[in-house]
Image: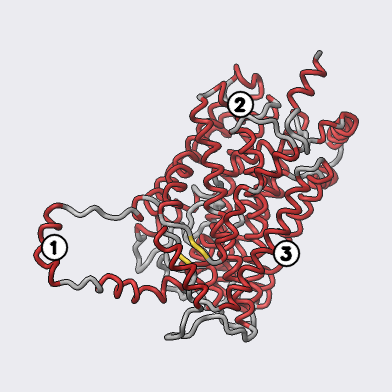
Amino acid sequence: MSSENEKSADAGLPMSPKWDPKKLAAEKAELRNLETLPLGKRSLGYIKRTGPGLLQSAMTLGAGSATASVVAGASFGYKLLWVQPLAMFFGVMMLAALSNVVLTRGERPYKSFGKEIWKPLVFLWALGTILSSVIWHFPQYALIAGAGRDLFAAFGAQLAIPEGGQVPSWIQGISDALTPLGFKVNTSINTLGYIISLGLGAFILAMNIIVVFNYGKGSKGVKLYERFLRTMIALVIFFFLLVCVLNIKRVDWFELLKGFTGYYGFPKTNGVVEPNTIMQVLGMLGAAVGINMTFLYPYSLLAKGWGEEHKKLARWDLGMTMFVPFTIVTSLIIVAMTVTGVYTGADSVQTGLTPLGAAAAFQGIPYGNVIFCLGLIGMCGGAVSVHMVACGFTMCEMLGLDMTQKRFRLFALTPCIGFLGVVISLPMWFPIVASAVCFTMLPIAYFIFMYLNNKRSYIGDAVGKGWKRAVFNIILGLALIFACIGSAKSIKSNVIDKLPSPKTPAAEKAEAPAAPETPALDAPAAEEQKAPEAAAPEETAAPAEEAPVESEN
C-alpha cells in the first residue's frame, strides 16, 4: 500500500528519476558514502550531483541582473561589489528554507501549501510566476536582439535608419497597426536590422524549445538540460572575464578588494550619501531572487527525485551552482564598467544607463563591446529557457492537471510570445500589472517559507534546534526585511511612478482658457521630438527592471 501511495505522490513529474527506484536507491547510498569521505572528496562528490541551483542561476542572470550590475558599476565603480553577493546570500538562505520544507514533506508545494496556508494566496504566488515569466520574457529577447544588432554594426553593417531617412513601408504599416493598441514597434532600424533581430530571436527560441522539451522527457532529458545551462553560464563567465582580462592593467586591485569587503558602505557623492544611492543599494539587496524562481525551485528539486537524504546536497547545490555563478558574473560586469571607462568617478546613480548603452561607451581594447554583447546574449538565452520550464510546471499546477510530458511541453511554450520583444515593446500597463503582482507577492512568499520552515506540526524536527536555528531565522528575517524594502522600491519605480498623473480640477480649469489657442499638432510634435531617443536600439533593448529575472527575475 505504501508503495502505491509513493507512486501516486510522484505522479505528474514525468521527468523524475524517482520512477527508477534502483537508480534512486543507488544515489542515496552514494550520498551516505560521501559523508564518510574527507572534505575535498566530499565536495567534489556533491558538485558532480548538483542541478536545481543551475536553473535558479540561469533565471536570475538575465536582463534585470545585467542592468542592475551595469548601473552599479557605471555609477560607483568597485564600491558596490559587496552588494550583489550579499543579496544573493539572503536569497540562497530563503531558498534553503524552502528546500528544507519541500524535501521533508516530499509534496508538490502548490497543493500542499494551499492546504496549510490559504489557497487564494498560493494561487497569487503561481499567478505572479506566470506573469513575471511572460512579461519579463520580452526584455530578454529585446536585449538579445539589441546585442545582436550591435555585433553586426561593429563589423560595418548599416542597420539604423539615418536621420531624416524613410522608414520602410512594411515596418511603418506594422507600427501604425499596433501603436493604437499601446505597443511600440522599433522604427529606428531598417529591413536588415529586422532580419537580424528576428533571425537571432528565432534561433534562440528554437534552441530553447529543443532543450526545454528534453527536460520534460525524463531523467536523461533533465541531465541534458542541466548540461546546456552549465555551458551557457560558462560562456557568459568566459566573455565577461575576457573583457576584464584584456583590460587587466587598468584593474586597481586594492580598490577592488575594498569594494568586496564593503569598505565604502553606501558611497558618498560630494561627501553626502544621496537618497538615490540608498534606494539603489537597498533595491539590489532585495531583488536578487524573483517570484518565479521561488515557484520553480521546489519543482526542480522534485523533478530530480530528491528527498530528505538530499538536503545537504541541496544546500551545496545552491551554493555552488547559484551563489557562485551569480557572484562571479555580476562582479565581472561591475569590474568591466570600471576598467573600460564607463565609470567616470562621479559617484552618482546613472539611472538611465542600459547594458547596450554601457557597451557602446567602452574604451580601451578593440571590440570590447562585441565580447560584452556576446555575454549579454548568453545571459538572456539561459534565462529564456528557465522561464519556459517555470511555466511548464506552474500552468499544470494552477489548472489542476497531472503533469504529463505533453502538457509540460505545451505549457512551457506560454512565455514564447516574448519572442516578439526583438522588435516590439509591450504597452505600459502590462509591466505595471506584472510588477504590482510580482513585487507584492515576493515578500509574502518569503514569509510563507519562513513560517512553514518553523512549523513543527508541518515538518516535525526538521525545524531545527538550538543556536543554529536561531541564527538561521535571524538571517531569514533580514532577507524578509530586504525583500520588503526592495519590493516597495520596485513598486514605486515600476508601478506608481509610471502611472499617469491625474489632473486636479484647479489645473484643468487653469488650462481650459488656453485650449483653443493651443494647436492640436503640438502633442504630436512633442512626441516627434522624443521619438529618436525612445526608438534607439539601446533603449528598447533592455527596459529597466528591478527584479531579476526575471527577473532579473
**Residue 263 falls left or right of residue 149:** left
Point out residue 305 in the picture as x, y percentages from the top left corner: 78, 34
Q: Which residue is mark 3?
A: 235
Q: Position of residue 29 (x, y in %)?
A: 88, 31
Q: CA distance from mark 1 to mark 2?
A: 56 Å
Choose the circle earlier in sequence order: 1 or 2: 2
Q: Residue at x 65, y 51 (%)?
A: 57
- When the figure is inspected, residue 193 is found, relative to residue 394, above or below; the finding is below
Question: What residue is disc 1 on?
Answer: 511
User: In the rendering, at what x and y percent does residue 156 appear?
Assistant: 62, 86
For the point 27% across and 70% down, which residue is it? 523
The spot of residue 85 in percent (x, y) is 58, 53
* Type of amino acid under label 1: Glu
Which residue bears the numbered disc 2? 111
Q: Is residue 297 toward the left or the right of residue 510 in the image?
A: right
Contact (CB < 8 A) between labels 1 and 3? no
